[in-house]
Amino acid sequence: MSFCCGASMIGTKGTLKYYRTHIHNVPITFCPVCHRVDVHYLAQQEYEILAEYAHGDGAAEVDYEDYVDQDELELLENCVNHEDEEPIEVVRSQIDISLDLLSFAQSIGDADWQVMLKKRLIALNSRRNKLFMRRSSV
């Protein structure tokens, strides 16, 4: 399971830019709180090789899936949430996880972790409220 700033990262596929080359359908994880994006750890080596060769060849765009055969289920099995889930459900799940972690942090008396988790909960609550506002305006 991948974590960023304490939130579980969400598994999906995306386009990454390597110098002037755009690489599509790269397995990535992203943080719903700070929006950090990482190449999935199981795809990191293949991505780096493909990116270097594509850039060296001067390719403007390549599709990761055209060159790398990887089991998609294996890539996403360690992710708590996935992109195809409803955004509000992802945020709710992230809030639940953060509340569980906050309870644990309080039980072991880790004040720094509690502060970090409270900041995360504020960010997640703000995101949840924006999603509710967007849903009600549709």
Image (spheres, rainbow, N blue to C red):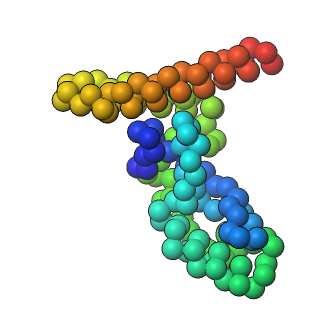
Q: In terms of depth relative to the viewer, which is nearer, 27 or 39?
A: 39
Q: Using the image as rendered, state which of residue 6 and residue 132 is in the foreground.
A: 6
Q: Residue at x 50, y 45 (%)?
A: 9
- Toward which corner of the image does residue 136 lie, by quadrant? top right
- Which residue is located at x 30 percent, y 32 percent? 112
**Residue 67 spot, x, y in % from top left:** 66, 77
Residue 116 in sight from this viewpoint: yes
Left or right: where does residue 26 sit relative to residue 106? right
Question: Residue shown at 64%/55% (left/top)?
Answer: 13
Q: Quadrant of the C terminus?
A: top right
23 sits to left or right of 75 = right
* Residue 93 spot, x, y in % from top left: 48, 30
- Residue 76, compared with residue 120, is above or below; it is below
Tell me: residue 78, above or below residue 58: above
Residue 19 occupies quadrant: bottom right
Vertically, is 24 above or below 110?
below
Along the viewing direction, whichever of 81 and 34 lies nearer the viewer: 34
Q: Residue 116, position in %: x, y? A: 39, 32
Q: State the residue in front, 121 or 45.
A: 121
Q: Is residue 63 visible?
A: no
Q: Is residue 64 left or right of residue 78?
A: right
